[in-house]
Amino acid sequence: MLPLPSRHGVIAFLGLVSMLVVGLAFESSAAIGLAGAGFVGLGAALAATLPAGRRLRHQRLEFAWWLDHGTGVAAGSVVPGTPFEVRCFLRHRGSDDLHVASLEPLVPPEVKADSTPSFVVPGRSRTELRIRLMAPAIGRVVLHGLAVRLRGPLGLFETPLYFPNPLVIKVLPRSAAGAEVARSAMPRGSAMERSGKTRVRRRGGGTELHELRDLVPGDPFKSIAWKASARRGRLLVREVEQEVQEVRWLIVDVSGTMRGGEPGRRKLDWALEAAAAEARRALAGGDRVGLVAFDTRVVGLVAPGEGKAHRIRLYDALLATTELVDEDLTDLSDEGLLDRVARYVRQQDGLDFRRRRGTIDVPALVEHCARALGTDDREGKAIREVRASTTAEQTLRAFCRARGLRLPHHADPAERAKANALGSALHLAGGTSREPGAIFVVTDLDGITDLEGVLASLRLARLHGNRVTFLLPDGRTFAPAPKSPEEEALHKVYGRSEERRLREARVELGRLGAHVVVVSADEPPALALPRAERGGRRAA
């Protein structure tokens, strides 16, 4: 690359131009001569800086980086809002010292990276440094490479260098950091093959006495406490509690209406944190947890399981919802997709697949992306998982997901598509098994104008004995504060519409026995589901 003028170089150039203008205006040969000599000096500094890039390529300046799991990382995991460090080294095989003016990792716009002060890399040495970053939300952060500027003679020009070396970092939910999660008190459930820590109240034999109460029609005679009945002179029934294993389903809305706003303050971020915290809490209590994520269709499904390994599977499924690239879920034309991938490959891999007249060699580009994916996915699984109209587009979209190239998501779901997807998710969780359990749904219901399909699936889930709890994020609390009178008016109109939709949803869903809770952006996600479940148990 050609050297670029530094701040001092720009100041020097402007100063020489001013001196030349003054010399010409006042016909001062001394000023003109000094300006000319200065321009010659700038040219000499540029000429001395030009070979730096070629010389460093010949000397094989090396770069590598990795995630530091030490200081600054909560419990060995990268979580939103917590700074983490990436360690890197520069190995210089040449004899001359390198003066690094700036060093900047190429990261997504929402990721914050601290600036690195200038430093010197001695000749024939390996220099290590740390870069401090912070991600605002759950997902994968891809550090594409490192942009370095080397200062030339006199500091007037700088040689830009780029080290393409993708580093993928998983930003897990905050519950992965080992933070304390709330435990719910005594939800009801059904017995499974082995015991867990979900408390179930029963009549008759059990492990822990809860209460003695009067006999009512329907109570089995074997549950009568005969000695206590004889002392009191009336028939009493022994009611006990027993700890059993329960199946808990988490249904998460990841559609476009959940994705609006600043990363870290979106409804989607809140929903993912709440689901992850509930999964950790339930698994720690011995229950089995399953997950369904839906957009305009079901986009993620994890069958119920238990244990630490299953928790990682749930976390991975939640992270995958933040980087959907399927054709039917994103707003990007075929031409836009080709242009984005071609520009990235030219910058990252140094390969230009553009032909004359601006066209792109599509077969060659697709073949390159397939080879790049093949290093991590020899059987083509990553490509087959992507939904697209052609194999070429599948490959390009899979490449975008692997390299962290974000594709714009559909802002609004198609008519009835989101309602049908929510109905399918409820059917998967509560309509296919005869074993009753608990179903937790986190959705804003935005874009759903007809609840008939949702109510049909909810009715079936309730007939199978499932407890269903809906958490509805209040969009008014997630929206940014208005900054103008026009925004204030729109905020009020949107607020009235949001209030009416939430009120109608509470009535319609409540008629079928679902517990509905409206949550705000300021409510801790880890506490919302336990609180909602306790409220549902009292209402039941």
Image: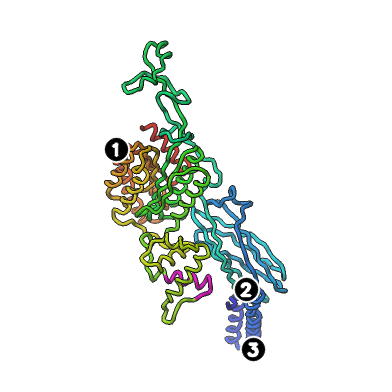
Q: Position of residue 425 (x, y in %)?
A: 36, 48
Tag 1 residue: 511
Tag 3 residue: 29
- Asked whether disc 3 touches disc 2, contact meaning CB atoms under 8 Å apart, the reply is no
Residue 371 versus residue 81 in the image, above or below? below
Q: Earlier in the sequence, mark 3 or mark 2?
A: 2
Amino acid type, mark 2: His
- Tag shown at residue 249: none
Amino acid type, mark 1: Arg
- Asked whether disc 1 touches disc 3, contact meaning CB atoms under 8 Å apart, the reply is no
Which region of the structure is painted magenta? 338-351
Residue 318 magenta-drawn? no
Q: Nearer the viewer, residue 294 or 522?
A: 294
- Mark 2 residue crowding within 10 angstroms, few (<14) / some (14–19) / many (20+): few
Q: Position of residue 459 (x, y in %)?
A: 30, 40
Identify which residue is drawn at 53% across, 47% down: 176
Residue 312 versus residue 62 in the image, above or below? above
Mark 2 secondary-structure assignment: helix
Which corner quadrant of the image does residue 341 belong to? bottom left
Residue 166 versus residue 216 in the image, above or below? below
Q: Quadrant of the C terminus?
A: top left
Tag 2 residue: 8
Identify which residue is drawn at 39% across, 71% down: 335
- Mark 1 residue crowding within 10 angstroms, few (<14) / some (14–19) / many (20+): few
Q: Position of residue 78 (x, y in %)?
A: 55, 52
